[in-house]
């Protein structure tokens, strides 16, 4: 069974279709990256999956329960970190968390123990008695993650969890997400507009464009899937670039050969490293390196945005 499954999930606001017939599956224990520009429909999707916004059409299950018909069962099994979470500045981290525990229906003893455990887990153990008004944005996000974990959820939704954080705060939150996914076995649905983030954290990525899923897969699968027409990029370092250009240009299957940053870049329909090697070394040139380059996620992402 999948942790999250959507069936033509759609949300319209008047003439705007925020989410358009979304079909995706997220496996249990997976860290799923939901990548899209501002306004592409990420938050709306998350709100529907958390049972906070009614779909206009289609549906979804989370932790095996229907987000419309079994919303209470869904809510018991999820944690949600909204994009702009806020806390009670005059309460300490521990008091804030115990309060959320109370709202979640935990008994006094349980919420005290759980809060202590979670503050340690997110690295706020030493700060538990400090008022949240004194917290940096990164510390507030850690508290937000602790809050999302209060009911020990199966599925954790994190909406742009590193937005507005400095590099250290970003690193801390990313490490925490990895820990929750890899060590605690949580299913994590993470929305982001940062390519580097999903590349670093996610097992699988879905790219959202104007409410539509334009591609889905692991970074490697996406690269293959989206780059089908211009698949192969070969980098050649050689002692004479101009002579190498002349040597390779007539090899069949080449789409483009250019000089870039002191190297020869070849784009081809197939892997022609062997032909390149023979042509270049046969011309008496010395090959310093010859390698196949995986397209970067940036390239893949841009490509996905071109796909209509
Ligand atoms: P961001 O990264 O800026 O948070 P997003 O990818 O999360 O963007 P959404 O917030 O889901 O995108 O918005 C998708 C579209 O739906 C946008 O055009 C937005 O203006 C519109 N939208 C979202 N919520 C509402 C609402 N309550 N009423 C009307 N339109 C809305």
Image (tube, rainbow, N blue to C red):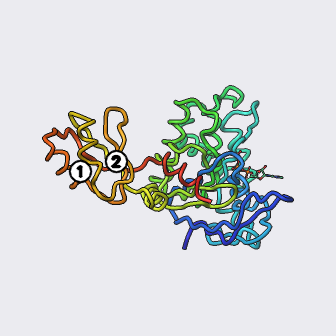
> Which residue corresponds to the image point at 69% horizontal and 44% vertical from the top-left?
83
Query: Which residue is more in the foreground, 276 or 69?
Result: 276
> Residue at label 1?
276
Numbered mark located on residue 194 in the image: none
Nearer-the-camera pick, 132 or 227: 227
Kind of element beneath mark 1: helix
Query: In the rendering, at what x and y percent does residue 129 appear?
Result: 64, 31
Q: Is residue 267 left or right of residue 250?
A: right
Whole-percent x, y for residue 26 in the image:
55, 64
The residue at 38%/49% (across/down) is 256
Q: Residue at x 68, y 25 (%)?
A: 134
| Residue 285 falls in image quadrant | top left
Q: Classify residue 252 as left or right of residue 53.
A: left
Of residues 93 and 241, the one drawn nearer to the viewer in this rendering = 241
- Find out whether the residues at labels 2 and 1 contact each other: C-beta distance under 8 Å: yes
Residue at screen point 25% across, 38% down: 237
Q: Is residue 179 visible?
A: no
Q: Residue furthest right?
A: 14
Mark 2–mark 1 Cα distance, whole angstroms, equals 9 Å
What residue is disc 2 on?
266
Q: Quadrant of residue 231?
A: bottom left
Report whether 78 appears left or right of 178.
right
Q: Is residue 161 above or below residue 186?
A: above
Residue 298, given in percent of the width and then of the height, sits at 50, 45
Q: Quadrant of the C terminus?
A: bottom right
């Amino acid at each position: 069974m999948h942790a999250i499954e959507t069936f033509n999930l759609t949300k319209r606001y008047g003439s705007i279709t925020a989410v358009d017939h979304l079909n995706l599956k997220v496996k249990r224990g997976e860290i799923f990256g939901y990548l899209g520009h501002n306004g592409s429909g990420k938050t709306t999707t998350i709100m529907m999956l958390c049972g906070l916004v009614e779909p206009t059409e289609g549906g979804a299950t989370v932790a095996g329960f229907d987000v419309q018909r079994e919303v209470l069962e869904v809510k018991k099994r999820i944690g949600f970190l909204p994009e702009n979470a806020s806390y009670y500045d005059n309460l300490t981290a521990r008091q804030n968390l115990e309060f959320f525990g109370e709202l979640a229906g935990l008994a006094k003893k349980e919420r005290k123990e759980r809060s202590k455990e979670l503050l340690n887990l997110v690295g706020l153990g030493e700060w538990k008695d400090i008022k949240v008004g004194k917290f940096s944005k990164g510390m507030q996000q850690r508290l937000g993650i602790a809050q999302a974990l209060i009911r020990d959820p199966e599925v954790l939704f994190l909406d742009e969890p590193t937005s507005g954080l400095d590099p250290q705060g970003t690193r801390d939150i990313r490490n925490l997400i990895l820990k929750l996914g890899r060590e605690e076995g949580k299913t994590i649905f993470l929305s982001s507009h940062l390519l580097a983030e999903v590349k670093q954290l996610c097992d699988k990525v879905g790219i959202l464009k104007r409410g539509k899923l334009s591609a889905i897969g692991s970074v490697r699968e996406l690269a293959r899937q989206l780059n089908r027409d211009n698949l192969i990029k070969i980098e050649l370092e050689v002692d004479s670039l101009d002579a190498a250009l002349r040597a390779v240009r007539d090899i069949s299957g080449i789409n483009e050969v250019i000089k870039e940053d002191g190297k020869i870049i070849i784009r081809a329909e197939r892997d022609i490293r062997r032909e390149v090697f023979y042509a270049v070394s046969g011309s008496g040139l010395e090959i310093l390196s010859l390698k196949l380059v995986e397209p970067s996620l940036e390239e893949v992402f841009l490509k996905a945005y071109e796909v209509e």
